[in-house]
Image: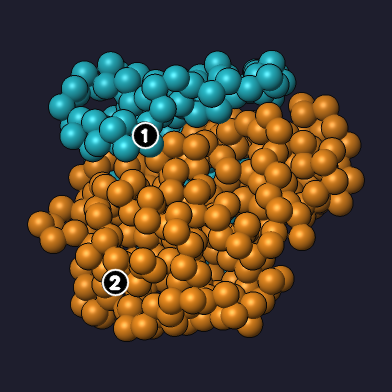
């Protein structure tokens, strides 16, 4: 059986650079995956994603839903005996996937983040009503959470109008990146 | 004592009662909170997912604003607190990142502004003896579990808050209020808050596990310090009998006998009044 995977030997170094980590220190103890709260829903789990980065399996890593499912809880990095902050590695992979526009079954999560950042660009602060509205349009799911949403509005916890800040221009300058 | 108060977006919206109870409790403790003028969103998990510079420069703009006020920052939201600490850490430890951040924000970091969380200020600065002296209505027989979640305690070398596996600060505070903090295994287990709106089913399991274990140890409520955990734990429980999720500041206000506390409970999606009403001062 032949396995065809194109390897990118520079992947490890670019991820190290972007995440400020040294993933070569990983000695495959699997502790990160063992404690990951989301591993049960992942395809590979944090340890195997990290292995892929070390081996240069860029396409597989960036196309896996795992990079978007990571909740950023930092349990893995806190427990890693070799001080690899895998949450930061996941961030670097996400940023890379967005830059290179990689197809991923969990790209709806990437789009959620895009909307979130777009709203910060607009107002300088988050506006939940716009976020929920945009999310409904993106996912075409108009039913989920309507109940809770209506209650939150009634309790005055989702302001209808966004708060805008004077320094929105400064915030946009900070955000000109992606 | 005076702080530049950074509520963050959640405390102006879904975490309204966290904002109100924090202000009320600090007022009662004689600490002045001046809201940071023109603060911006810290970017939360979306900022650091998409953009390495925004991940640190967005929170850093708020540090710059506080530096201008010559005050330390008080950040009640665990997620904001975390992002501010990450930005501060990058500035302090990585000269290249520091340059980029200072450039993007347009300020020069002076190192004069500390980032503080209310729990740390209350326990380590104001002190539990003063908290005890303020208690008018001890929360006797209230069995509560402290839920620290992720962002307050991790990564430990960056947030420098408490022991990341066995934090005690919130438990000590609850005990000072007369409540009974109960040991449990889920104090720092992630509730999946950042996936709450995009992967509700994955989150349902995480939240149900947390609530089930709280019930198992006989807790009447889960006490939290994070507005994202709070709403996620309220919204994503699937069992019929839901565990009430309250902020530690709400319990402080209750034990201090603050009249305003009566207005906080109705803001919750899971009404905690069956548990807290008996401590209300008439
Ligand atoms: S915990 Fe650290 S050393 Fe162990 S497998 Fe995970 S990354 Fe590698
Ligand atoms: S940070 Fe991500 S990969 Fe690490 S334990 Fe948390 S969810 Fe899993």
Q: Is residue A131 above or below residue A36?
A: above
Q: Colour of chain A?
A: cyan
Quarter of the image that includes the C terminus of chain A: top right
* Residue A90: % across, % down: 49, 44
Disc 2 and disc 1 on one polypeptide chain? no
Quarter of the image that includes the N terminus of chain A: top left
Q: Is residue B184 above or below residue A164?
A: below
* Residue B38: % across, % down: 68, 29
Residue in front for this viewpoint, A78 or A4: A78
Regarding residue A92, the answer to whether it shows in the image is no
Which SS class for mark 2? helix
Q: Which residue is mark 2?
A: B278
Measuring 57% from the left and 52% from the top, which residue is drawn there? B23
- Residue A15, quarter of the rendered image: top right
Q: Would you say the residues marked 2 and 1 are in contact, meaning their CB atoms lie under 8 Å apart? A: no
Cα distance between the residues tagged 2 and 1: 26 Å
Label 2 neighbourhood size at 10 Å, few (<14), some (14-19), many (20+)? few
Residue in front for this viewpoint, B239 or A13: B239
Residue in front for this viewpoint, B256 or A123: B256
Q: Is residue B279 above or below residue A48?
A: below
Measuring 77% from the left and 42% from the top, which residue is drawn there? B66
Q: The chain shown in orange is which?
A: B
Measuring 29% from the left and 71% from the top, which residue is drawn there? B278
Measuring 50% from the left and 69% from the top, which residue is drawn there? B256
Can you tell which mark lies on residue B174?
Answer: none
Q: Chain of mark 2?
A: B
* Residue B280: % across, % down: 36, 67
The type of colouring in the image is by chain
Q: Which residue is mark 1?
A: A156
Which SS class for mark 1? loop
């Amino acid at each position: 059986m032949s396995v065809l995977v194109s390897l990118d030997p520079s992947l490890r170094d670019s991820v190290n650079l972007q995440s400020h980590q040294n993933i070569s220190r990983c000695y495959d103890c699997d502790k990160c995956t063992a404690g990951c709260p989301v591993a049960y829903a992942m395809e590979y789990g944090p340890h195997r994603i990290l292995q892929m980065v070390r081996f240069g399996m860029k396409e597989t890593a960036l196309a896996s839903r795992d990079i978007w499912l990571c909740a950023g809880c930092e349990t893995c990095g806190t427990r890693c005996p070799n001080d690899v902050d895998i949450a930061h590695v996941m961030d670097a992979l996400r940023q890379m996937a967005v830059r290179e526009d990689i197809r991923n079954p969990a790209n709806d999560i990437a789009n959620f983040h895009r909307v979130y950042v777009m709203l910060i660009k607009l107002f300088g602060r988050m506006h939940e009503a716009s976020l929920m509205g945009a999310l409904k349009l993106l996912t075409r799911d108009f039913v989920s959470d309507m109940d809770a949403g209506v209650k939150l509005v009634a309790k005055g916890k989702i302001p209808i109008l966004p708060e805008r800040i004077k320094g929105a221009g400064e915030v946009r300058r900070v955000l000109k990146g992606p | 004592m005076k702080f530049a108060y950074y509520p963050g977006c959640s405390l102006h919206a879904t975490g309204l009662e966290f904002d109100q109870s924090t202000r009320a409790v600090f007022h009662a403790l004689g600490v002045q909170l001046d809201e940071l003028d023109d603060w911006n969103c810290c970017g939360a998990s979306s900022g650091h997912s998409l953009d390495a510079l925004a991940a640190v420069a967005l929170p850093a703009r708020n540090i710059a604003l506080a530096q201008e006020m010559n005050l330390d920052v008080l950040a009640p939201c665990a997620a904001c607190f975390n992002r501010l600490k990450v930005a501060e850490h990058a500035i302090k430890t990585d000269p290249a990142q520091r340059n980029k951040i200072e450039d993007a924000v347009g300020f020069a970091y002076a190192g004069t502004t500390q980032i503080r969380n209310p729990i740390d200020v209350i326990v380590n600065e104001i002190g539990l003896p003063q908290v005890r002296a303020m208690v008018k209505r001890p929360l006797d027989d209230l069995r509560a579990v402290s839920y620290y979640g992720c962002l307050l305690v991790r990564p430990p070398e960056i947030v420098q808050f408490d022991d990341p596996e066995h934090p005690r600060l919130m438990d000590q505070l609850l005990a000072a209020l007369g409540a009974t903090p109960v040991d449990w295994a889920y104090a720092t287990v992630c509730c999946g808050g950042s996936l709450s709106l995009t992967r509700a089913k994955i989150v349902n399991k995480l939240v149900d596990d947390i609530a089930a274990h709280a019930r198992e140890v006989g807790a009447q409520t889960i006490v939290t310090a994070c507005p994202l955990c709070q709403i996620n734990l309220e919204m994503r429980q699937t069992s019929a009998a839901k565990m009430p999720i309250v902020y530690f500041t709400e319990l402080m206000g209750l034990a201090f006998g603050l009249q305003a506390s009566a207005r906080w409970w109705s803001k919750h999606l899971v009404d905690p009044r069956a548990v807290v009403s008996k401590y209300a001062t008439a």
